[in-house]
Amino acid sequence: NKEYRCLSAHSHCVDVTDDRTSKHVGYRCKCSSGFQGNPYLEGGCTDINECLQPDKYTCNGICQNSLGSFTCFSCPRGTGVTIGLSSGAGILFLAVITIIIIHRWKKGIQKQLKKRYFRKNKGILLEQLVSSDPSASDSTKIFSLEELEKATNYFDHSRVVGRGGHGTVYKGILMDQRVVAIKRAKLVASAEIDQFINEVAILSQINHRNVVKLHGCCLESEVPLLVYEFISSGTLYDLLNGAQDGRLLPMPWEERLRIATEIAGALTYLHSAASMSILHRDIKSMNVLLNDSHTAKVSDFGASRSIPIDQTHLVTAVQGTFGYLDPEYYHTGRLTEKSDVYSFGVILVELLMRKKPLIENENGEKQNLSNYFLWAMGERPLEEIVDKQVLQEQDMEAIKHVAFLARECLNLRGQKRPSMKDVEMRLQFLRARKVAPGKDEVVRSHRDVGGGDWHGGVVPAA
Ligand SMILES: *[C@@H]1O[C@H](CO)[C@@H](O)[C@H](O)[C@H]1NC(C)=O
Ligand SMILES: *[C@@H]1O[C@H](CO)[C@@H](O)[C@H](O)[C@H]1NC(C)=O
């Protein structure tokens, strides 16, 4: 028998077999794994320092050689945490930088946009101002978007005081503690923007105690924002119909007459302002605001137009509110001051009857108040038509005059309607007669001043 030939420590023998016959043919010596050298010599197999051959023995951490093997502390604890931390911080840092850059970029874009909107909006605005009246008052202030955002707590929902057909109205408090109403368009359609700009152009020329005051506007947002004086006591519609809490407060005849006179005064002013006649085009009780002492303030000039005095304007798109719309204007598209007179007539009827502009008649059908009123005037005694509270005050004479006046305003033919100036004068006369002690005396003095006859259907020329 052969002696054991694998002399070296850390060596062993392996069987050798014939490749073809798979028969055992002998054995061979081999250094154990982790060792290298000559296994047939004593001490021939020596340790491999794996750490010196990183390409052969991979270790991503700290390598420590041992006899026949090596240990790799793949990620020593402290280092790991540090590396984790520093790479985390790196990512965070990058993120922050990115956010800052994006923010700057966005801000830049916003600034650009603001500038662009401003230029665009102001362009239209100036065009309109110049085209309508070169001497337009420049007291209208241009507000910055930031100012209005602060005033409304970034257009917070809790600040919404009204939603109209044209936009949302927010209550705002300016830096100087002035309370304002800020109107923002609902849609971003350019037609809406034009309406807003139109309103600025028109209102900036108006200064009347019965027209809501425009403080200014903001042109930096996509839709221009309009800043008005804040009118605190709701609309005439709310007062008449108890829309705020469903309760109908008593409305003395005196007050109804005063409000009617105030609205008529505002419209007279609008119709005869300077060389241009401003047509409101959307007169309705919802567009008449009331302040704390119930002084009427005509608002919402979005649909208004200024046209040269004594001219008829042909418009393509008929605008207005159902129930108030002048039928003649509706059918012909011909716009004159008399369309506002018609709408005012509807308000007079509302004040007389204390009914909504669209009512259910005796047969349960929906009908507009104006048509019902005209029909009832021919069929019924006035006492059955007008509001009960008005009747109790027993000024039947004045009530009759207002009812006749309303009927004249609602004449289907615009030409036959009185002018707003006539209407205002007749209302003012009625008010004066009410407070004056002697009826005849007042009539005489009125005649002296106006030179007209207030009784008949014919209206004195002013
Ligand atoms: C209501 O408006 C009128 C006209 O602008 C003003 O004289 C009056 O002081 C206002 N009332 C209140 C309570 O603010
Ligand atoms: C009143 O109603 C009739 C039919 O319902 C309509 O033809 C007319 O245009 C309306 N008038 C106004 C002023 O809305």
Image (tube, rainbow, N blue to C red):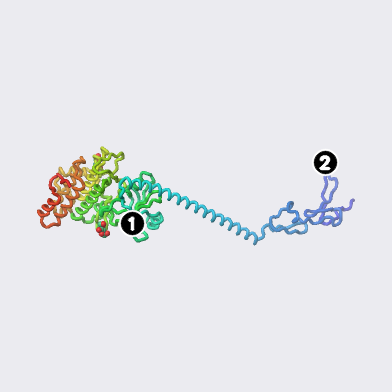
Q: Amino acid at mark 2?
A: Thr
Q: Quadrant of ligand 1?
A: bottom left
Q: Foreground residue, 205 or 146?
A: 205
Dot 2 crowding, Cα within 10 Å, few <14, some 14–19, many 20+: few
Q: Label 2 to label 1, Cα distance in Å?
A: 107 Å
Q: Which of marks 1 and 2 precedes in the sequence?
A: 2
Closer to the camera: disc 2 or disc 1?
1
Q: Going by the picture, which residue comes out furthest to the front?
A: 134
Whether residue 227 is visible here, answered yes or no, is no
Q: Which label sits on residue 67? A: none
Q: Foreground residue, 322 or 15?
A: 322
x, y percentage for residue 442?
12, 54
Q: Foreground residue, 16 or 239?
A: 239
x, y percentage for residue 328?
24, 39
Check the image and report above or below for 381 versus 161.
above
Whether residue 406 is visible here, answered yes or no, is yes
**Mark 1, secondary structure of its residue:** strand
Q: Find disc 2 in the rendering and name its residue.
A: 21
Q: Amino acid at mark 1?
A: Val
x, y percentage for residue 160?
35, 54
Q: Find disc 1 in the rendering and name its residue.
A: 180
Q: Going by the picture, which residue comes out furthest to the right?
A: 1
